[in-house]
Amino acid sequence: MDRRSFLLGTAVGALTVAANGLAFAQDAGGTAPDLAQFPRNETVIVHNPEGIIRNPSWFNLWAVGAGNGTSNGLHNLTTDTLWFIDPDAGIEGASENAVYNSLADDLWQYNADFTEMSVKLKQGIFWSDGVEFTADDVVFTVEKQKATPGTPYNGAFSAQVAEVTAPDKYSVHFKLNAPNSRFHALFSVRWTAAWIMPKHVYEKVEDILTYDANPPVSIGPYTLHSFDPNGTWYIWQKREDWQRTALGMIAEPKPKFVIYRNNITTDNRLIEIRNGNLDMVHDLTPEGTFAVVKDDPQIQGWFPGFPYAHPDPTLPMIIFNHQNEKFQDKRVRWALALMLDARAMSMASYRGAATLSAISVPPTGTHPRDYHAPLQDFLINYEVDTGTRKIKPYDPNIGLQIADMVRPQFGDAVPTDEAAVRNAFGYGWWKQDVAAAEELLTAAGFTKNGNQWMMPNGEPFAFELMVPQEGVINRLGVMIAQMWSQAGVQATAQVDSDPWGRQRVGNYETNIAWAVETWGGHPDLSFFLDSYHSAYVAKPGESQPDRNWMRWTDPRLDTIIENIRKIDFNDPKGIEYGHEFVKLHLEEMPNIPIMAYNVFSIQSNRFWTGWPNAENPYANPVTNWSNGRYIFTQISPVAG
Amino acid sequence: MQGYLWFAAKRFIQLLAVIFFGVSAMFVVTYLSPIDPVEQVLGRLSARSNLSPEAIAATRLALTEMFGTDQPVLTQYVNFWSRLLRGDLGASLMAFPTPAMELVLRAMPWTLGLLLTSTAITFVVGNLAGGLAGYFQNSRLLKAFGIVTMGLQPIPYYIVAFIILIVFGYLWPVLPISGGFAMDVRPGWTLPFILSVLQHSLLPALSLVLVGLGGWFIGMRALVSNIVTEDYVTYAELAGVRRDTIVGDYVIRNALVPQVTALAMVIGGVFSGTVITEQVFNYPGMGSLLVDAVNAGDYSTVLAVCTISIAAVALAIFIVDLLHPLLDPRVRAE
């Protein structure tokens, strides 16, 4: 062999090995679908915001950290549990107060002291392999996870469930270790919940943590059709017996096929929905949304015009670390709030498409009805004592001002009706009042040296504001740091790749994130508020349980939480306690709530229509929430 | 021959040392990472559910035990090497209990297929055009080629990639902009699958080739520009040696040696993948795997990718060292 042949042979050999590996690596996939099988009037294509699914052939949702896809259709179409609580209003007639009875036939029934809970189950529901769903499945779900560390509800069931039994085929009875009026929340889907396991499948599995469940046995109206061995798409097909599922008992899911596509960058999904290759997009940038709705009249957002985005029941805010001595005086926290200009924050983050909230409840779902509107007069008359004078800091018209600011650019797309503007832009926020902020700081013992505020100990008032690497929250944080700097506070926006990790262990001074998440469609605040109890506050450096990232403690707060624990989920008194919490929060300002986490979810009416929106808010359009399943019962194909 | 074997043996020992120290350094770096894989899993679990603080604490304990992150660092290091020597890089912590190597092997063929092909194209075209441009310095065609490639070279890669995406995905949507192959094709050694892979790789490959050509072109042209003034080239021309022989065998071949060394480094580097290409075109590969693993605190997978990358670079250099005597008679003589 001469030198030339040797070199050529080596190159060809390397390429052959690489190509062979390429083919070999793909063999793990299911059967290849023929796209001709998926006419667009039978197929909905959904963008799933998950990245590449690293364990694509894994469908066991009862093993933690397995790297499987979740919102790839698996928890949207094949799972079920006792109840769903919609982040929006829910389908009229099928839900009450946004609560759906899913596998349960009725609401939870507690005994007087909330130490026992009984549930009646629906009859006539079957798993996709033909086995009937019964109370034994629920009992197995609890007992198996209780006995298996590494399952998602191992800790919850171990800590809370003393005994679970099935008095008959369609009844389940829980005895709890301690009174808990919100125990049913473990089986109530907001984004997810404790999914019920098919006992007949998992009881035969020796180690469920190493079981891939491929293909999954479904209790939803769809089963797995095929998937990408590289983890970027999944296709689900409607069951022949879809009527024998809880969703099917509400109405027929219209698409025969649902395709979930993930790992699609913002620019790609913008192009893909424009080209008709996606029907639902989880989210875009504000700018991307403005461009595509202008370019394609068939594409819609949540609001018919500006700001288009869906406000999630999540509340981005400035979070102070209360274990840092700089932020232990509420006058300082209030001063920092009054240095901010809501209009600038809205424009910098969402280009004006923000839904503001001055109170610690997201302005979304049914919360404006229960909290923002009833508390409006209280807020207008709310007074803050600056140490020099009393001021009324609330401006109820900031939303209207922002609407006026964006109207020259977006014209008729911006609503003019006052109620519509408040719904879309928020009820109001604090007036920027730097003079009042200075009075508050002075009262707290701060002094000013030139344009620099000095703390009572003589050191400059300087701190870091942790922000994520990109996106609207990053832009919001940078703007806030800039406004504080202009007011004489040395705030530095610090970009961090792992802000949630640092937030968890309290390794930050201030932070832009959210410490409030609610059910959305239901006024109960326990979803986030229960974890605010002082019993759960960790020591500095230790891991803080979700969601009191501030590590705020207050005996009055504990009393409110304990009072909520003593009443039923649907007790109207819950709203009263919620109002008490809001007022205490205003007094203490432990964090500065800013706006809803607006998600620029868009849908195309080219092939399917009937999507939820602000005028018909029957469901959350954000595609990775498992309660998005109800959308499939309400849409219809445009052609045939 | 004995001298060559001794030379090869020394290089081989060097190869093993580079791999050992490189992988050990990576182990230390991943160990020092502030990202805790247990907390990452917990974050994903608790952020969207309604778990009580007691439940989260119990799950944390269970995961720490499962992942083995509670063991002393020295124990973890020894376990890592003992597993590695058996070809086992441990379970991925972001896809537990799937072996990290399985994740790497799934992503690697895509990276190799795309990057080896695009590197080969840029190397051959860039060097050939650069060599000719260095020799035929008055050619208008080659001058124009040089202007285009050197014009593209300084443009940030992601800009070129996005322009290609918009042109071929939106303005003139003739090529797929996402994925490695179409949904209606069964993976395997079939013509539809091969064609689909080629079709899906066209845009990512084009972006890499456009940006990659300039470097090779400029380097080769500069090398050749020096060589053409050498006495032996002038002598060959005066002696009436055929022009293509002078260009191919006398000029480009001599200029190629440093380029081949650079090629070895590039080929070794392809094992790390190209993050931006994979992200812009949603293309599978090692780059995004590495980023995901870092963000998830999955040090098993990070180490798997890095071990392969370190071994590949070291091996590529080793092979080039061994090939040099074959390419360059002067090295052989030494």
Image (cartoon, coloured by chain):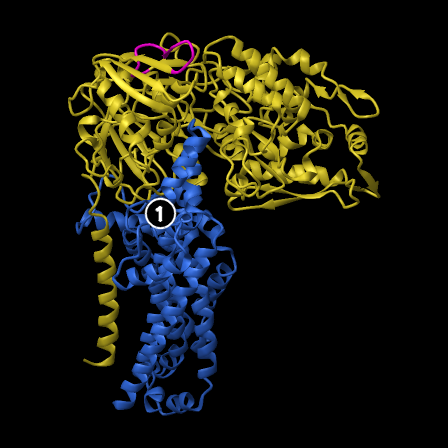
Chain colours: A yellow, B blue
Snapshot quadrant of residue A358: top right
Q: Nearer the viewer, residue A91 or A613?
A: A91
Q: Residue at x 23, y 56 (%)?
A: A21
Categorize mark 1 by other alpha carbons within 10 Å: few (<14), some (14-19), many (20+).
some
**SS at mark 1 in the image:** helix
Residue at numbered disc 1: B67
The secondary structure that most of the magenta stretch takes on is loop
Q: Position of residue B125 (x, y in %)?
A: 37, 66
Instruction: Specify the amino acid type for callout 1.
Output: Phe
Q: Position of residue A264 (x, y in %)?
A: 39, 40
Q: Quadrant of the C terminus of chain A?
A: top left
Q: Which range is magenta?
A: A102-115
Q: Residue at x 22, y 35 (%)?
A: A213
From the viewer's perspective, tell me whether residue A368 is left or right of residue A223: right
Q: Answer yes or no: is residue A263 visible.
A: no
Chain under disc 1: B
Snapshot quadrant of residue B84: bottom left
- Based on the picture, tell me whether residue A104 belongs to the magenta stretch: yes
Q: Residue furthest left?
A: A130
Snapshot quadrant of residue B56: top left
Q: Answer yes or no: is residue A452 visible.
A: yes
* Vertical position of residue A623 compared to residue B8: above or below: above
From the viewer's perspective, tell me whether residue A376 is left or right of residue B304: right
- Based on the picture, tell me whether residue A58 belongs to the magenta stretch: no
* Vertical position of residue A268 compared to residue A520: above or below: below
Q: Residue at x 36, y 49 (%)?
A: B68
Q: Residue at x 53, y 29 (%)?
A: A535
Q: Position of residue B318 (x, y in %)?
A: 33, 75
Q: Nearer the viewer, residue B262 or A61?
A: A61
Q: Quadrant of the N terminus of chain A?
A: bottom left
Q: Nearer the viewer, residue A589 or B106?
A: A589
Q: Position of residue A51 (x, y in %)?
A: 38, 41
